[in-house]
Image: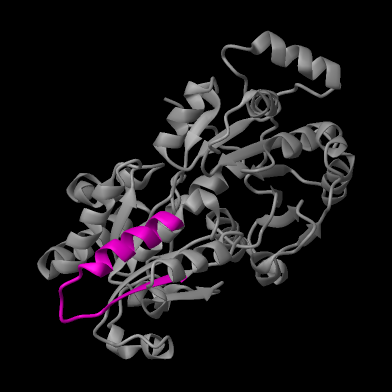
Amino acid sequence: MALTYLDSGAECERGRQALQLSSKPCDRVSPSDKVRVTHVVFDIHGGGMESLVAAMAKHFQGSRIGMSVVTLSGRAGKVGESIRPLLQDFRVLKCVPGFSMLAPRKLARCLRELKADVVHVHSGCWYKGARAARMVNVPRIIYTEHGLTLDNGTVNRWLRRHAAAWTHFAVAVSDRVRKDLQEMGVDHRSLTTIENGIDTEVFSPAPRRSSALPSSLGIPQNACIVGSVGRLEPIKAYDRLVEAFASVHASFESRRPAYLVLCGSGSQEEALKAKVRALGISAVVRFVGWVDDPVEYYRMFDVFALSSLSEGLSLSLLEAMACGAIPVVTDVGANADVLGPELQDQVVDLHDRDEYVRVLKRTMHSAGHQAAVTDHGRERVVTRFNLTRMLAEYERLYCGGQCESS
């Protein structure tokens, strides 16, 4: 069963014929066989999608799932280098812009060499990955949407429409993303939700006093620390978080000093540092760069803040909550669903900057509120967003399972 768009079946069929692609249904893979799964990613440097692929590499090493990764960015990336020893194969491709989109022969040749039973394409390269996999008749093509781009223009709609026609199963990381895909016309019969999961034994609370991290950053042990872990890119809107923290800090009345810690790197780093200087808060803001293991940072945070313009299901939010940090998030992607009905007062409308400041200030001030949110937040992640459950659901799809559509 190929994934189709409900409102454009004829156009997709013409596209398949014009590109001379196979339209056969996906083949079932015997659970007793070794299954060769090749992940196709645009880049594997750092982020939520990369963390998910890394978790799969660790889990499936030595199992019946033989996992390979192909990155199209021309670089291995930090996460790619870290998981390379766990993989059957790791390929770095640098495709020619434009032509390689219409005829991704280099990627198709690579998939043929890897003898992939399953190609698992991730956000950022759906069209190219699905197109190449169909060119070499890969039996099963899976796509995971980690969070829809804000650009839903004509070109992106065209690319999604044709990519969907070549894909057997599409996975959304949250019900909200799934709903968005359905509203774009993706056939619900081939669409499923597999929520992201984390290892809650690794990501767990620990007393800050047991860590030397605050002192190493020049932060007093008794400080109230607001933090975030993510790519310093426009989609994360960290400029809004910096502005909100500056506003709160200016009127922060507490015996505890307040600090902001941002973990990550990206194109906006220098602009954010300039904004921090302009707001006069350089003394209480720390840019720590890329962090390979953020657990100790999460444990140090009193408040974990997301100011994103768009999200899928944020792994960093799950990790922070599991470590006991209190979330303050914008109402995008699955953020509200992750927090659940009991914590909806920690979710702020994307466009209400004043309310974001109010919620951040209230959260930093109220010790009683902090304790209640901390306990509930961790419990919710442990019971619902489980890594073992997530991996089992993907393995089922790899080995011949069908989507549980609704």
Viewer-side residue, 236 vs 166: 236
Q: How many marks?
A: 0
Using residue 165 as the reference point, say whether residue 307 is left or right of it.
left
Residue 206 makes an appearance in the image: yes
Q: Which residue is drawn at 56% across and 48% down?
A: 395
The residue most toward the left is 368
Residue 321 makes an appearance in the image: no
Viewer-side residue, 206 vs 399: 206
Using residue 30 as the reference point, say whether residue 272 is left or right of it.
left
Identify the magenta region.
Answer: 239-262
Quadrant location of residue 365?
Answer: bottom left
For the C terminus, which image quadrant? Answer: top left
Q: Residue at x 55, y 27 (%)?
A: 190
Task: Relative to 170, say whether 39 is above or below.
Answer: below
Q: Report x, y in % for residue 274.
A: 51, 67
For the N terminus, which image quadrant? Answer: top right
Residue 252 is inside the magenta segment: yes
Residue 402 is inside the magenta segment: no
Quadrant location of residue 388?
Answer: bottom left
The residue most toward the top is 10
Quadrant location of residue 68?
Answer: bottom right
Using residue 161 as the reference point, say whether residue 375 is left or right of it.
left
Q: Please say which color scheme the image uses.
A: one colour
Q: Report x, y in % for residue 338.
A: 33, 49
Q: Residue at x 68, y 26 (%)?
A: 155
Q: Report x, y in % for residue 246.
A: 32, 65
Q: Report x, y in % for residue 135.
A: 84, 32
